Image: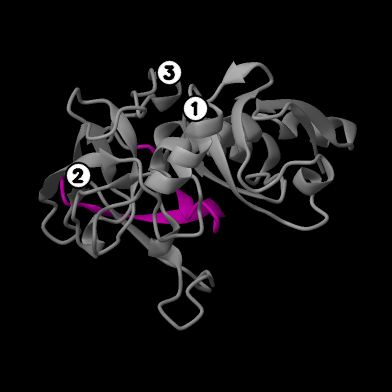
Amino acid sequence: MRILTSASLIRSSEEDGSKILDKLKIKVRLPSGKLVIGTLWKYDSYYNIAVVNIKASPELREACIHNQVPANVKLSQSKLVAIGRAFESGELMATGGTLLHGTTKFDCQQLMASTCKITKAGIGGLIVGSDGKFMGMSFYYKDGAPFLPFSILQKCLKHFNKFGRVVQLSLGLRIGSLQAEKLHVREQVHDSFPNAHGIYVQMVSDKSPAADSGIKVGDVITKIDKLELFNAQEFHELILDKPKRILRHGEGMPFTLAGTQDKVAMSR
């Protein structure tokens, strides 16, 4: 049985927080209070996720997240609940909040922001919507719990199974949802493109596939492969679907980006 959690729980507490502990001993507390030993199967430092294996137990029910309909994350101010469990007592912890379209303080662009205030004990816990749907995995930050959306988690698990790791395609882009940008940025875009929606290009690395394709800071990308985009997470979800063909054929893969100008970017 595999348990999905945060890689923060398996990292060293020393200055180099990205280092995975040597001779790691993982204890998993079951609902009955019984402790079982787990082993680290896979982890990814960028997404800060880890998968722990334990022997199958009738106390734990399997979460069929691959078959769940993704919750709607397009609406800001949606009601959320962050859920965790105290390790020693086993008691559930919960706190309410709302979904934000603002950016987080972390490097991972795929994280979404919420106002749910949790303690470090809640790292790796669930974020659920008011309708009970699984929205993502929570991380700790003093101003509110950022979380990795369910759709990205789903893609990462598929990468673990297919490739043994999460395959990152470096396009040389830093993007954000247009509706989350500062007011003057949105006004500038809408002055030229009144009906624009999608993702805003915040940074383009020199000599990157994005730069070579002509993408510039300030561009707005509205579609990828003819699929409309409304937020940055949707862009990253589609990019995570690309590696299968790239790894199989050993070459780059072109895809069309439609926005303020039509462009073609080549992943490498």
Q: CA distance from mark 2 to mark 3?
A: 21 Å
Residue 56 placement (x, y as % from top left): 38, 37
109 horizontally vs 140: left or right: right
The amino acid type found where label 1 is placed reads His
29 horizontally vs 169: left or right: left
Q: Earlier in the sequence, mark 2 or mark 3?
A: 3
Image: magenta residue range = 32-56
Residue designated by label 1:
197
Q: Residue at x 73, y 41 (%)?
A: 215
Q: Residue at x 28, y 32 (%)?
A: 58
Residue 198 placement (x, y as % from top left): 52, 30
Residue designated by label 3:
67
Residue designated by label 2:
83
Helix or strand or loop: what does disc 3 sit on?
helix
Helix or strand or loop: what does disc 2 sit on?
strand
The amino acid type found where label 3 is placed reads Asn
Q: Earlier in the sequence, mark 2 or mark 1?
A: 2
Q: Residue at x 41, y 34 (%)?
A: 150
- Report crowding for label 3: few under 14, some 14 to 19, many 20 or more residues within 10 A (C-alpha): few
- Dot in front, 3 or 1: 1
**Of the pair 250 and 114, the residue shown nearer to us:** 114
Q: Residue at x 23, y 47 (%)?
A: 30
* Residue 202 colored in magenta in the image: no
